[in-house]
Amino acid sequence: CVPLGIYQLLFLPLLLDLIVFFLYLEAECFKEQGNAFYNKKDYYEAFNYYTKAIDACPKNASYYGNRAATLMMLNRYREALEDSQQAVRLDDCFMKGHLREGKCHLSLGNAMAASRCFQKVLQLEPDNGQAQQEHKNAEAVLQYEKMAELDFEKRDFRKVVYCMDRALEFASACHRFKILKAECLALIGRYPEAQSVASDILRVDSTNADALYVRGLCLYYEDCIDKAVQFFVQALRMAPDHKKARLACRNAKALKAKKEEGNQAFKEGNYESAYELYSEALTIDSNNIKTNAKLYCNRATVGSKLKKIEQAIEDCTNAIKLDETYIKAYLRRAQCYMDTESYEEAVRDYEKVYQTEKTKEHKHLLKNAQLELKKSKRKDYYKVLGVGKNATEDEIKKAYRKRALMHHPDRHSAATPEVQKEEEKKFKEVGEAFTVLSDPKKKSRYDSGHDLEDDGINMDFDANNIFRAFFGGPGGFSFEGTSGPGNFFFQFG
């Protein structure tokens, strides 16, 4: 007689096999349901059923492979990588598992690890077209990485952005590539794009020190220095050894302090000190385009106060090179051009300003510059007489007397014909200038920029008659013809 316990021992393995079999059937059922949802692109439900399949039968490589595929569709590449690695641990010949592991590595930016996975597939199946293509993709990413590293050292940030864009076509989930791209976008002034990339990463990982640094960098370069410092400090809390965040934080604080010192010196009227402080601030960070543009413009303002007009123009030009939309720099440069009577350049700058901001003030400035330009192209009667534009009637008369005597033809009768001709021309110009500036109506019209002949004002005159009228009479000069018209001699009364 066989004891009952022995029968139990004999049937226990069979019982266990039956349990495993039924669990396998249940797992297969879950897998089929998962497949159905996957085909419908309902990846969340597919994930749930693949998870149930794994729970029922945790040693099946294909279930992990299927869940990895689903996680990849949900852009959860790190979790997908874990599942695909578990799949190939369970079955080293599972090609889909190796392919998915490689794809996950590549999507996360680890092209070297991805390349090894694809090589494993090609060992198992040398003609696998997908593995061949993915291996080429991994090699391309490695190449773009190397190019970007070299270009960053050369400060060719636009090319780095290009390389990262190409790499991200294969490594779409690589935060490292995105951060490098965002940093370079900030360095070339494309701040909204850089902020968008950094913000996307922070939504997924709010403690990402690199993304916090880039976010701060954008604010720093947009001259929002206080807010930028907050982000740099936060990045350093997450990663105390973050060298870039530490340097940027130090530069931001130094730049703010130096700029404020310059502003205070300017307010106090200490222009020499303000000029030096702005100059020092400009040496702190050449990459900070917006702040440096403002510093150049501030130094130009100080320069104009110190009568360094040419230097002020150069500073405004540097500011505009850094920020082509900087209206204040155009206005400051235009005023400097007006001060140096470079009216064509002034008109050009005021036109740029008015096209951007059509205000009454800008319109007035433009019209005034256009008027001065028009006036500058006429004969400058004030220069002809050698007087200022605010000269009195007596000063105009004295100036005429001096210039008329200086250029009178009789004084140059012994000179060459060329000199005589030139002096006669100048003598007539002096008479013309006096005719206009000694007549209040003509002078007013002339000062207003009007063309006197176009206004119908008679400009016919005889320089000799003016001279006679001015110097004639008792005790003055008189002129008598000697050998023909235009020849005179001086006779003192």
Image (cartoon, rainbow, N blue to C red):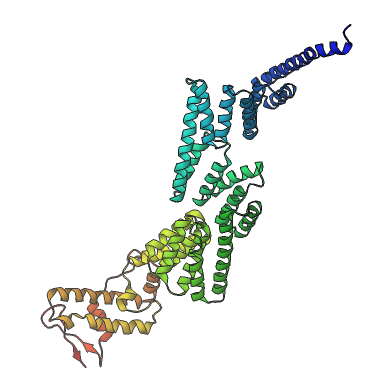
Answer whether residue 56 is visible to the viewer in this image: yes
Q: Farthest front residue?
A: 1
Q: Position of residue 73 (x, y in %)?
A: 62, 28
Residue 190 in the image: above or below residue 55? below
Q: Farthest top residue?
A: 1
Q: Position of residue 182 (x, y in %)?
A: 54, 46
Residue 473 in the image: above or below residue 384? below
Q: Is residue 389 left or right of residue 1?
A: left
Closest to the observer: 195 or 50? 50
Q: Position of residue 293 (x, y in %)?
A: 49, 60
User: Which residue does the image show at 53% across and 60% down from the upper left?
Assistant: 291
Pick the quarter of the image with the N terminus. Answer: top right
Image quarter of residue 35: top right
Image quarter of residue 490: bottom left
Residue 404 in the image: above or below residue 362? below
Answer whether residue 368 is visible to the viewer in this image: no
Q: Position of residue 258 (x, y in %)?
A: 55, 68
Q: Is residue 20 left or right of residue 357?
A: right
Q: Is residue 2 left or right of residue 161?
A: right
User: Which residue does the image show at 75% across and 21% down from the upper left?
Assistant: 56
Closest to the observer: 167 or 10? 10
Closest to the observer: 418 or 155? 155
